Amino acid sequence: MLTYYFDLALRSCRRSKALTALVVVLMGLGVATCMVTYAVFRATAGDPIPWKSGQLFVPQLDNFGPEHNWKGEPPELLSYTDAVALLYARQARRQVLIYGSKWTVLPDDVQQQPLSQDGDAVSHDFFAMFDAPFRYGGGWSASDDDQRAAVVVISSALNQKLFGGADSVGREINLDTHAYRIVGVLDDWNPSPRFFDVSSAWYPFSHPRQLYLPFGRAIDLQKAASTNFYCSTNSADPDLPNWDSVLHSECAWIAAWVELPTRADVERYRDWLHNYAAEQQRVGRFAWPPNVRLSDVGQWLHMMKVVPKASALSMIVSVSFLLICLVNVVGLMLARFMRRAPEIGVRRALGASRSAIYSQFLIEAAAIGLAGGVLGLLLTALGMTGIDHVFEPEIARLAQLDASLLLLTMLVAVVTTLIAALYPTWRAAQVQPAWQLKSNG
């Protein structure tokens, strides 16, 4: 019976070529527009670490005070004083400090030009906390942190550039005229967005860092932060004459994360954070009540408004366009089906039930939806090639035409066409065979 209905659908499409083509084009355009913008929205709004996002938290505490914070919200970053206190309190399963900086790589070949690379100064738990994959070696140890060891983890891209992609663990590279021993080479790893330092980086969809060095060593080398640097004076250039004044200032420039596997761990850490702020008030450092926050990955990304407005707005516009296409398809389907009222009347008079009419026309709609889906796939692929003309290159490169997007395109095309056909099919099934036979008799 299914084959018979498909045969009827093909015959109907051949008889109404113009209407069929118009429906297919409308669905193809609507679905392709929606899928191209969805590919961008998915890349920017997706959970960057879904298997663990409920266990990773950003601690915040207000060291600026009500006169200088943002509408009662604590700074996004921590001062050095608070960051180090958090790190060495060891109240979480893992705790990580991060701040970005610029490093100069001096190649062994003197004929090669020095390379300026972005790097992150991080504590040793960084790689385990964020499940960073390694191609060679691994991260450094806690003792390396304590000893301010001259060790480094590099990206696979930098390893390819310096060592041709070979296993470089144990070899040395020269950073800012200091020799560092390579302990690990990361695999291709670029979480989007870069959630773990989205508060300290200028742009959360930027290219991955090429270097990761011990936090303590960067501090000892007086390596200045190359990312956000907030001070309670609201001055972009605060009066900080030397590195010691930076470390003892109330300026916020260090990102912090903690790993808390259970709800009890979360509540216990929140209490500790509140008590720490209360202690700072008691000793006279803060002149205001404790003001702390503890946000997981999803809450943090929402708070930081990581999803670009252009991406969200484009998604809304494209869905609206698909709905407009859907309304027009309803009208076209209604005209298409009601033109066949005499045929329906004859079939009903010969014993066809209303359910048979429903089946026939819904299968016909599904067939048209499949054709619209094929066109949608072609237009989606075409749209993906020009996506960098609409969105920033950093975002455009994240959108991928993968198998899941192809499947979703076909599914949306078929389902939306079936939805559009529901009312026209219901109207067609209500045709009275006696009236049709009399009017055509």
Image: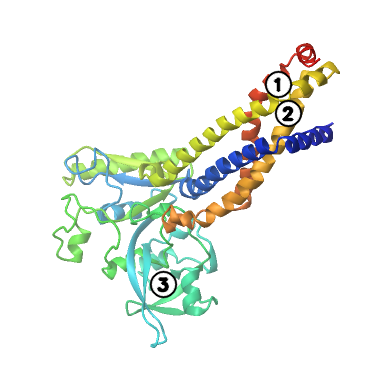
Residue 284 or residue 416, whichever sits in front: 416
Q: Do the residues bearing badges 3 and 2 touch, measured as CB atoms within 8 Å?
A: no
* Front residue (pair 232, 60): 232
Q: Is residue 56 left or right of residue 244?
A: right
Image x and y of residue 409, in percent: 61, 44
From the image, tell me which residue sits under label 2: 361
Q: Residue 377 at x, y = what percent?
A: 62, 49
Residue 187 in the image: above or below residue 333: below
- Judging by the rendered image, the residue that carries numbered circle 1 is 428
The disc labelled 1 sits on which kind of residue? Ala
Residue kind at label 2, given as amino acid type: Phe
Q: Residue at x 61, y 46 (%)?
A: 376
Give percent across and percent down for residue 79.
26, 53
Label 1 and label 2: CA atoms lie apart by 9 Å
Instruction: Decide if residue 26 is on the left or right side of residue 208.
Output: right
Q: Choose the circle earlier in sequence order: 3 or 2.
A: 3
Q: Residue at image x 43%, y 62%?
A: 208
Q: Which of label 3 and label 1 is nearer to you?
A: 1
Of callouts 1 and 2, the N-terminal one: 2
Confirm or deny contact between disc 1 and disc 2 (CB under 8 A): yes
Residue found at x 68% / y 20%: 426
Q: Earlier in the sequence, mark 3 or mark 1?
A: 3
Secondary structure under the numbered disc 1 in the rendered image: helix
The answer to which of 70 and 416 lies nearer the viewer is 416
The residue positioned 81% from the left and 36% from the top of the image is 7
Circle 3 is placed at which residue position? 151
Asked if labels 1 and 3 touch by Cβ distance under 8 angstroms, the answer is no
Q: Residues within 10 Å of mark 1 (few under 14, many from 20)?
A: many
Q: Nearer the viewer, mark 3 or mark 2?
A: 2
Say which quarter of the image contains residue 141: bottom left
Q: CA distance from mark 3 to mark 2?
A: 69 Å
